[in-house]
Image (tube, coloured by chain):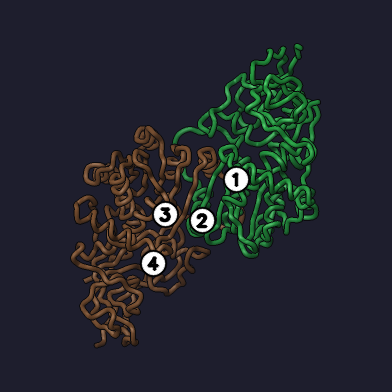
Chain colours: A brown, B green
């Protein structure tokens, strides 16, 4: 069987905001499978902010992408051919397949999913990396106690929405930060957060103060920049900052060498000092031991209707770059996916 | 016995850099002692950067100072009158006596020192709060392994000088950051650090890179601002930032409300993220359980000549404000003290 496969590669390193010209769609015949490999027909592609970080040159938690590399992504797909006994044809799997319609990958690299737990797309959201990120980051690093206040930025997003709902399940006050009235209303009315503050409001800082009368014990940080700055100004003694992402910075210009002190940044560090705060950055892929217990909780909560989720689905691989660019500007509403087939 | 006591109070909250007009020298007769109190004739006064933080209005780890409050400080002094059996007349004690020649304090609030361990002034330095701060922060929070690289700012100062020497004793590479060639030479030649970089050099960042060929595993941070920024750009995977102070920021203008994102600050946070770094801020007075083990180590090392220290001594209470202002600009060279009697 020879299949024409479409894939999206990075044509060049973006300068500042990502543009359509940074991507290139290619088409090629799929090579045959080696022993131990499976061929996956991708059904959904997950778009996540970390991909923009991968596109930056320079040091990071993985080697940066090279020009011509396929855009990285997790997909959920169906095995249409198998040369591995462990993953038979017909299985549904999550693979690190990248932005493409099909992928030949080692069977050992995929996670077989149970379609009875929910729609297959949830394997890229609440029952996937975003869900585990929320669970591990909040419970293991944030360690909120009942009655404490958890603030999470990008609160209507794939990770933030789960963070706040878990915080509520654990008896905390959950305060979201999101962009725009519509998202904020959803976060409070649908997801059950105690409050949600629109960072675009002229009086954002005042609204955040009003929403955190007992200050902030856990900052689950997805955004960075002025949003993080505002939250740090509300920290409690011994607050924990869970550093999951800094999407506000991923498109910033590349900088070299020494930089002058910025009063903003310095002030922020002083907030950490005076509150004897801690901060822990993490990448969930480095904590495989936490995946199984997180899935157990999340699947249970989902089944009991205690956790809700929302998806924003673009159609077709050809629309993945546009959906990605929109997401980086906060234009998505819920977990961003691309439906491929 | 009636004693005329001189003391220095905060006349007003400083605006930006501290000035002579922010202090006022007062003189008053000492009141009689209550049961359980002792009268201490202060011999040395310790000047430390945290005092500038205490002078700022707004939230901090202690309530901010009020106008008219005596300037806070630890002193070492001699008990000249006692109404407490536990601390007899003639004892040498460390007290939170503030900037004054004498102080009547509860006997339970002082630490009696053993003059056999070293000159009494060391009870305010290597065998006092700065020494314990260095020991706890580096070993308990920084947790350096042999062969790892420890960078410490304000490296010729009371805390930094001990941090680097302990790092060497533990088999680490110790890199200091200090202001000026003279201090840097002292840090390497006298204290035995592997390298010391002058943050005033035009090519500071490049020098820091050359001094940290294996990057940085522990940043013991006393300074903040562009100095911290430069160190963060050199972090290793899983680096630990020990946040002890941000002296570069203590004289910054007071700010209210939301601030715009500064690319500098945001970039710095990204450095924490991509290296999965952690940061822990601390105030040593909140860790009393660590004082005894730290003293045991430090006294031993001092006795064996494994730790050196340097003092910068101003003469007379009337010169304390000027010495304090000089210290905040990095003008001191070694632990800043004021000799009172």
Q: Position of residue B118 (x, y in %)?
A: 79, 40
Real-space Cα separation, disc 2 to disc 3, in angstroms: 11 Å
Q: Are marks 2 and 4 on the same chain?
A: no
Real-space Cα separation, disc 1 to disc 3, in angstroms: 23 Å
Q: Disc 2 or disc 4, which is closer to the eye?
A: 2
| Residue picked out by circle 4 | A21
Label number found at residue B277: 2
Is A41 rendered above or below residue A216? below
The residue under the point 47% across, 45% down is B261
Subunit of mark 2?
B
Compare marks 2 and 1 and give the one earlier in the sequence. 1
Tell me the quadrant of the picture where the N terminus of chain B can be found: top right
Q: Position of residue B171 (x, y in %)?
A: 68, 61
Mark 2 falls on what kind of element? loop
Give the camera-side residue of A190 and B74: B74
Residue A233 lies left or right of residue A162; in this view the side is right
Q: Position of residue A225 (x, y in %)?
A: 45, 47
| Residue picked out by circle 3 | A244
Q: Residues within 10 Å of mark 1 (few under 14, many from 20)?
A: many
| Residue picked out by circle 1 | B224
Label number found at residue B196: none
Real-space Cα separation, disc 3 to disc 4, in angstroms: 29 Å
Real-space Cα separation, disc 2 to disc 4, in angstroms: 34 Å
Residue A167 lies left or right of residue B209; in this view the side is left
Is A327 rendered above or below residue B56? below
Q: Are marks 2 and 1 on the same chain?
A: yes
Q: Are marks 3 and 4 on the same chain?
A: yes
Mark 4 falls on what kind of element? helix
Tell me the quadrant of the picture where the C terminus of chain B can be found: top right
């Amino acid at each position: 069987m020879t299949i024409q496969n479409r894939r999206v590669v990075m044509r060049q390193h973006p300068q500042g905001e990502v543009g359509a010209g940074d991507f290139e769609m290619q088409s090629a015949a799929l090579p045959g499978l080696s022993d131990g490999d499976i061929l996956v027909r991708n059904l959904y592609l997950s778009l996540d902010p970390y991909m923009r970080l991968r596109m930056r040159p320079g040091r990071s938690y993985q080697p940066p992408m090279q020009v011509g590399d396929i855009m990285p992504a997790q997909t959920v797909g169906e095995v249409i051919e198998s040369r591995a006994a462990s993953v038979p044809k017909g299985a549904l799997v999550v693979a690190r397949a990248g932005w493409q319609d099909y992928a030949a990958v080692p069977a050992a690299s995929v996670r077989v999913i149970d379609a009875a737990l929910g729609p297959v797309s949830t394997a890229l959201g609440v029952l996937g990396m975003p869900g585990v990120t929320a669970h591990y980051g909040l419970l293991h690093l944030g360690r909120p106690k009942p009655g404490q206040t958890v603030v999470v930025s990008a609160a209507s997003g794939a990770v933030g929405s789960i963070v706040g709902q878990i915080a509520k399940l654990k008896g905390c006050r959950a305060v979201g930060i999101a962009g725009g009235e519509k998202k904020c209303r959803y976060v409070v009315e649908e997801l059950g957060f105690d409050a949600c503050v629109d960072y675009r409001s002229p009086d954002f800082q005042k609204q955040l103060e009003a929403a955190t009368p007992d200050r902030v014990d856990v900052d689950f940080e997805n955004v960075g920049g002025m949003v993080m700055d505002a939250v740090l100004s509300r920290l409690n003694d011994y607050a924990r900052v869970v550093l999951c992402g800094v999407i506000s910075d991923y498109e910033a210009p590349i900088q070299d060498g020494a930089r002058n002190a910025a009063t903003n940044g310095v002030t922020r560090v002083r907030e950490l000092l005076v509150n004897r705060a801690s901060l822990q950055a993490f990448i969930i892929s480095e904590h495989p031991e936490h995946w199984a217990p997180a899935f157990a909780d999340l699947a249970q909560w989902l089944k009991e209707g205690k956790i809700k989720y929302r998806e924003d689905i673009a159609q077709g691989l050809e629309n993945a770059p546009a959906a990605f660019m929109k997401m980086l500007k906060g234009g998505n509403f819920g977990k961003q996916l691309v439906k491929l087939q």
